[in-house]
Amino acid sequence: MAKDWVMHASGGGRTINPVPYTGEAELFGVKLAEGDLEKMRDAHGVIRYHLVFEWLLPTFSEEGFYEFVAGRMRNYMIHIMKDELFRPSYFDPMDEKYIQADHVARFFGCQLV
């Protein structure tokens, strides 16, 4: 609970007070649609972090977040290849090697770790 938080002002940083939660109860709830919780479970019934994280991400016109970002990355890569004569080493759309949504998801996962 926020009242139990301890503030440490060492290291030259500024003290930041906790932001009080002003919801209906001390614990807050998450509004899951019917069946969303089951989509976050693996084959053994365990809720997996990466599936929860994907649920939190925005969608763009029924297109998932990773697909959206991969499409923007492909567009930018083609732009710098045409306008700045950049030659990529790994993902080269001219050789039909495209950035896929799984590549973006792994990249973001590495950043989170």
Image (cartoon, helix red, strand yellow):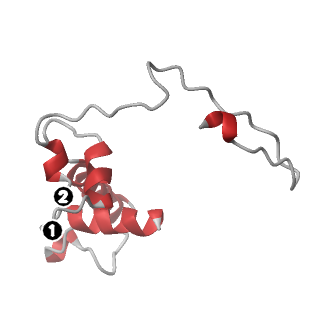
Which residue occupies 78% across, 44% down? 7
Disc 2 to disc 1: CB gap under 8 Å:
yes
Residue 45 placement (x, y as % from top left): 16, 62
What is the crowding at mark 2: few (fewer than 14 residues within 10 Å), some, or many (at least 20)? some
Residue 14 placement (x, y as % from top left): 82, 42
Check disc 2 and report its element: helix, strand or loop: loop
Residue 42 placement (x, y as % from top left): 17, 64
Amino acid, disc 1: His
Identify the mark at residue 44; answer none if there is no mark.
1
Amino acid, disc 2: Arg
Asked if one can make out residue 57 in the rendered structure from this viewpoint, the answer is no
Which residue occupies 61% across, 26% down? 20
Residue under numbered circle 2 = 41
Measured along the vertical axis of the image, is residue 84 above or below residue 66? below
In this rendering, would 100 be left or right of 6?
left
Which image quadrant for residue 96? bottom left
